[in-house]
Amino acid sequence: MPPVIIGSFEEFEQHNGKELGTSEYFKITQNQINLFAEATHDHQWIHINPERAKKEGAFGNTIAHGYLTLSIVPHLWDQIVEVRNLKMMINYGIESLRFANPVVVESQVRLVAKLKNVANLRGTVKAEVEVKLEIKGQKKPAFTGVLVFLYHFN
């Protein structure tokens, strides 16, 4: 499904309280996990040691870092919403974030987004987006939360 196109506060307002869409599935690989571990200096064995994770871990294999799953949101969000006429966008915050289910290596995930609220703050658009990262074949999502973005339109 093509992304929802938004170019102004008024266009954001039309989607207030509505589901915006769902991204394509994205596969989490061991290479991505290893690169994330290097970037963040988080080398916990449940992420980077497949042999030990298979023997001693609770999940049968390595799992993605929770923050790795969160860090792919911009890629998945761009598949759901295309914001045009944009001067600048700022990640403003995350509310009620819960990591509910581990993402085992080679799992596929996708983002589901709903516009919880949108407000015009003297020309800056504040968008609160309810998100969940679904794991293919799992009932429980990897995480849920509310992402807050500030959009400055031209």
Image (tube, rainbow, N blue to C red):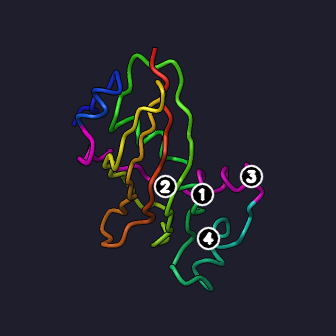
The residue positioned 45% from the left and 37% from the top of the image is 126
Q: Amino acid at mark 4?
A: Pro
How far across and how far down the image is residue 92, in percent?
Answer: 56, 42
How far across and how far down the image is residue 120, in percent?
Answer: 41, 32
Residue 19 lies left or right of residue 88; in this view the side is left
Q: Secondary structure at mark 4?
A: helix
Dot 4 and dot 3 residues touching (CB under 8 Å): no
Label 2, on which residue? 28
Q: Nearer the viewer, residue 142 or 147?
A: 147
Q: Nearer the viewer, mark 2 or mark 1?
A: 1
In 3D space, how far apart are the residues under numbered discs 2 and 1 (Cα atoms)?
13 Å
Q: Amino acid at mark 3?
A: Glu
Q: How crowded is the residue under tag 1: few (<14 C-alpha within 10 Å), some, or many (20+)?
A: few
The residue positioned 47% from the left and 49% from the top of the image is 147
Q: Secondary structure at mark 1?
A: helix
Label 4, on which residue? 50
Q: Nearer the viewer, mark 1 or mark 3?
A: 1
- Residue situated furthest right in the rendering: 41
Say above or below: 116 vs 120: below
For the N terminus, the image quarter is top left
Q: Nearer the viewer, mark 4 or mark 3?
A: 3
Residue 25 shown in magenta: yes
Q: Secondary structure at mark 3?
A: helix
Q: Which mark is residue 38?
A: 3
Q: Nearer the viewer, residue 56 or 84?
A: 84
The residue positioned 61% from the left and 77% from the top of the image is 53
In 3D space, how far apart are the residues under numbered discs 3 and 2 (Cα atoms)?
16 Å
Q: Nearer the viewer, mark 2 or mark 4?
A: 2
Range of residues picked out in magenta: 15-41
Say above or below: 72 vs 58: above
Q: Which mark is residue 67?
A: 1
Closer to the N terminus: mark 2 or mark 4?
2
